[in-house]
Image: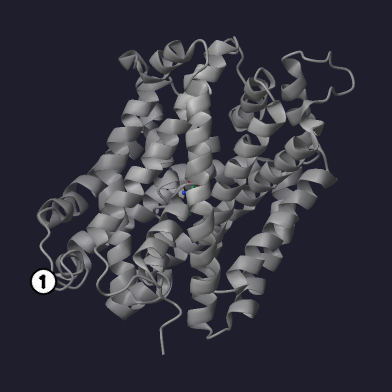
Amino acid sequence: MANTSEFSSKIGLIAATVGSAVGLGNVWRFPAETQAHGGAAFLLVYVICVLLFGIPVMLGEFAIGRAGKSDAIGSYKKLSPGKPWWISGFLGILCSYLILTFYMVVSGWTLEYLYQSITGQLFTSIPGVEEGSNLQFADRMEQYVAGIWPPMIWTWITIVICGAVLCMGVQKGIERVSNILMPLLFLILIILFVKAASLPKASEGLAYFFNPDFSKITPNVCISALGQAFFSLSLGMGTLITYGSYFRKDTNLTRTAFNVWLLDMMVAILVGMIIFPGVMSFGLEGESFDGSALVFVTFPEIFNNMWCPQLWSALFFILLSVAALTSSISIAEVSIAYFSEHYKMKRVPATCVVLLPLLLLSALSSLSNGILSDWTIFGYTIFGACDAVTANVLMPLGAFIMSIYLGWFAPKNLMKDQLTNGGTIRNNFAGTIIFLLKWVTPILILVIFITSLIM
Ligand code: PHE
């Protein structure tokens, strides 16, 4: 009988893994981080981080998953029984849960904005704000996220939709949904890109996005770029170990990692190439929003200046919802795989065990943007703390421990065997990847951490 905890085709495997990588991280988090950390200077450091750490760490996770053939904890236990390396998988599961608490909230905002785009409500005036003023969208967003019921209900709707897909399992749920939604996402992105390229000040926008000011590069920019690289590629928290365990014996890991990296990077850059021409063309460059609002304020403003705003806006929020859904699924799958493997639970109960407590936690996270905004941890709200601590601390830490494990303590030849499928395929990059994982990744992560703490 076919193993249904395995992706059934190459395309499905790529679609699901790209579906995990391409998410709110590319469309919502990336432009916000770019804006907050010096524009093109951030982009440059980000690209370096993705190349130096992204691909080796991704391959490391794939290798552990496919060799261990289990969840994030179980794979470590199988590969190094009796050793404490499984703690790295445990940290990953913890991290994935923290990410879900804010990721589901933003996914909920996306669904609400999609609904409002389709009904046209998004483009109507709101009380107290002059119609057509630039403030219209900023105020709408601020009022919306600070509200009690609407953002909470949309968050719950997102959790239920993800739960339904996850209950259907790896092939019938995750793979099938990704196969349909990912091509749709790329199609919409290309339509929006063509539209943005025809805007009056497109070239100025592009110059702004691509011209780095090197004086803006600080340790803080580096740690944020590192965090963004891990977040965007879904690294350091067991997602790709879990997906790696669904890969087949003959999957070429290096080619898969390269494709995922390329498509993920392309989406982030295309989003920048859509947003900045729009910002320039419609005179929005003087406005600075809180990062989390950028996409929800700037994009509707851009659309409002175009023919048939509702159409563009609906397309964009479909794109964002698709990106959010396929990534949320992959984040939740880390814990679901653990419960079904470790406690031999069926998919449906395992999905319920993981998602039910999330109804409460994500509600708290949502409320922390409004009535619970006084509940702070080191000055961060619950929502902000979960975002910062996962991307900037837990994910790099997870990748650090994993690279130490693979470089120094894993069974001999594990990486080499996985990169060459047991010697059956040639891999000219195997030596470089193993070297990067053993030396470059752990040392650089440590250096970036220490300098950002000192400075
Ligand atoms: N990579 C996803 C994004 O860019 C987020 C994610 C993080 C998914 C960690 C899985 C694991 O939105």
Which residue sits at x=34%, y=14%?
Answer: 213
Relative to 343, is 14 on the left or the right?
Answer: left
User: Nearest the camera: 48 or 310?
Assistant: 310
- Residue 158 location (% of width, % of height): 69, 55
Q: Is mark 1 within 8 Å of ligand 1?
A: no
Which residue sits at x=89%, y=18%?
Answer: 128
Residue type pointed to by label 1:
Gly
Quarter assignment of residue 6? bottom left
Relative to 353, is 9 on the left or the right?
Answer: left
Relative to 35, is 349 on the left or the right?
Answer: right
Relative to 63, is 453 on the left or the right?
Answer: right
Q: Residues within 10 Å of mark 1 (few under 14, many from 20)?
A: few
According to the picture, the residue beneath numbered tag 1 turns out to be 423
Image vertical order of residue 305 relative to residue 21, above or below: above
Question: Which quadrant is the C terminus positioned in?
Answer: top left
Which residue sits at x=46%, y=27%?
Answer: 272
Most extreme residue toward the right is 127
The answer to whether any part of residue 80 appears in the image is: no
Quarter assignment of residue 51? top left
Image vertical order of residue 338 relative to residue 387, above or below: below
Most extreme residue toward the bottom is 1
Quarter assignment of residue 148? top right
